[in-house]
Image: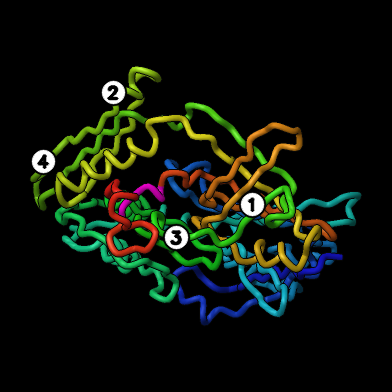
């Protein structure tokens, strides 16, 4: 028996574009046989995509059959109803995944033992399906994101948006474009990130959040940190980028041509001599000034011109140290920062110590067993920037690389 409690709830009869505070949740935890939920991306240059869940429910009584009019859930066993997965530990209940049912696939063994393997997706699917038309205003990136969410009717109380740190150019005029693609454009142009939170909120994190955040937990294979079960590391050239091209195009209403078009390029010739030219291009950005676009390009080259030792993933089995690990399973979120230390078991090996961002979260569970895996990206050069007025990042002569 696990020290924490799993809770799975479905809001039969509710819809995605109404406030979740008014939803009526039905607890189906006693039907759960196992499952997996995941959200995030593979690495820091990927886009956060829609998260997915697969949860096996006991259906031996036929309650999850959509045509069963005697079901207590009838007539609302339908695609698109909200579903959430929560952990209860230490008197605190918290969602670790929220989304909407896509499928109710039913299986029967020997015609008696029925199960339904619920397939669900998070709210990014609705942002992808929703089309927006109009002209974006010149304003902060968070305000532009909010403008798009308003246009598609996304509830105001289901947003978690950091304050803007810059101003994006206006004039971009989407014509029935995916709301998600327009939101990503606003975030990417300012160096921020957009994802769906575990509570089902559209979350935006500005670039200064990523530069200045501190580690929320430390993990180690010795007694100096929290215990982990599996660790994967790699030292390779997969994310070596020594030429970054930042294309800026400011659209103008009623024209097919951009009002302003700039192509800005940052290079590191030493890295190019060693590893060859490795180009990353950011197209059609709405960054407000050429200087800001060049700063963005230079910051990427500075951080990625050389190979980085990467802690790629870390898995924990919370029952190994319930009091310390279950709160981590419950509370860690995408783009949280953690500190990972690995001391080789053989003598003479160098210790690896790395601060990492959580890029993907996967929870796998079944009765009596739970594993959480975080895909990670390195934070090894974020602390090299000079952030004016931020303790630990603003000492003149010590941290003098100006951060974008």
Which quadrant would the N terminus be assigned to in this image? Answer: bottom right
Residue holding disc 3: 213
Residue holding disc 1: 362
Nearer to us: label 2 or label 4? 2
Q: Is residue 374 above or below residue 19?
A: above
Separation of marks 2 and 4 at Cα, in angstroms? 34 Å
Nearer to us: label 1 or label 3? 3
Crowding near pointer 4: few (<14 within 10 Å), some, many (20+)?
few
Residue 293 position, x and y percent, is 21, 44
**Label 1 or label 4, whichever comes before in sequence order:** 4
**Label 2 or label 1, whichever comes before in sequence order:** 2
Residue holding disc 2: 269
Separation of marks 1 and 3 at Cα, in angstroms? 22 Å
Nearer to us: label 4 or label 3? 3
Observer-nearest of 307 and 30: 307
Residue 31 position by quadrant: bottom right
Range shown magenta: 382-386
């Amino acid at each position: 028996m696990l020290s924490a409690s799993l809770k799975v709830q479905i809001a039969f009869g509710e819809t995605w574009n109404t406030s979740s505070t008014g939803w009526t949740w039905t607890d189906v935890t006693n039907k759960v046989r196992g499952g997996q939920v995941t959200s995030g991306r593979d690495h820091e240059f990927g886009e956060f995509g829609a998260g997915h869940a697969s949860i096996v429910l006991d259906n031996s009584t036929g309650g999850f059959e959509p045509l069963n009019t005697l079901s207590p859930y009838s007539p609302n066993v339908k695609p698109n109803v909200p579903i959430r997965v929560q952990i209860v530990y230490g008197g605190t209940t918290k969602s670790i995944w929220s989304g909407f049912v896509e499928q109710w696939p039913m299986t029967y063994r020997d015609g008696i033992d029925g199960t339904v393997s619920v397939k669900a997706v998070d709210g990014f699917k609705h942002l992808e399906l929703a089309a927006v038309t109009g002209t974006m205003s010149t304003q902060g990136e968070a305000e532009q994101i909010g403008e798009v969410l308003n246009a598609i009717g996304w509830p105001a109380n289901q947003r978690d948006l950091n304050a803007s740190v810059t101003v994006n150019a206006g004039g971009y005029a989407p014509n029935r474009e995916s709301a998600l693609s327009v939101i990503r454009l606003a975030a990417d142009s300012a160096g921020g990130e957009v994802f769906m939170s575990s509570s089902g909120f559209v979350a935006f994190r500005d670039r200064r959040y990523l530069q200045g955040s501190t580690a929320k937990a430390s993990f180690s294979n010795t007694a100096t940190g929290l215990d982990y079960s599996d660790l994967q590391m790699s030292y390779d050239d997969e994310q070596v980028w020594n030429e970054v091209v930042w294309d800026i195009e400011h659209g103008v209403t009623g024209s097919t041509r951009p009002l302003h078009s700039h192509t800005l390029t940052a290079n590191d010739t030493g890295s190019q001599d060693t590893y060859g030219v490795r180009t990353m291009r950011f197209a059609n950005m709405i960054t407000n000034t050429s200087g800001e676009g060049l700063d963005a390009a230079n910051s990427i080259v500075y951080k990625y011109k050389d190979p980085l030792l990467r802690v790629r993933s870390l898995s924990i089995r919370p029952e190994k140290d319930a009091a310390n690990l279950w709160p981590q399973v419950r509370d860690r979120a995408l783009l949280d920062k953690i500190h990972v230390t690995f001391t080789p078991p053989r003598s003479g090996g160098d210790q690896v110590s790395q601060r990492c961002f959580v890029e993907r979260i996967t929870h796998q569970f079944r009765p009596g067993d739970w594993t959480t895996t975080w895909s990670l990206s390195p934070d090894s050069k974020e602390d090299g920037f000079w952030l004016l007025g931020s303790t630990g990042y603003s000492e003149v002569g010590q941290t003098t690389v100006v951060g974008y």
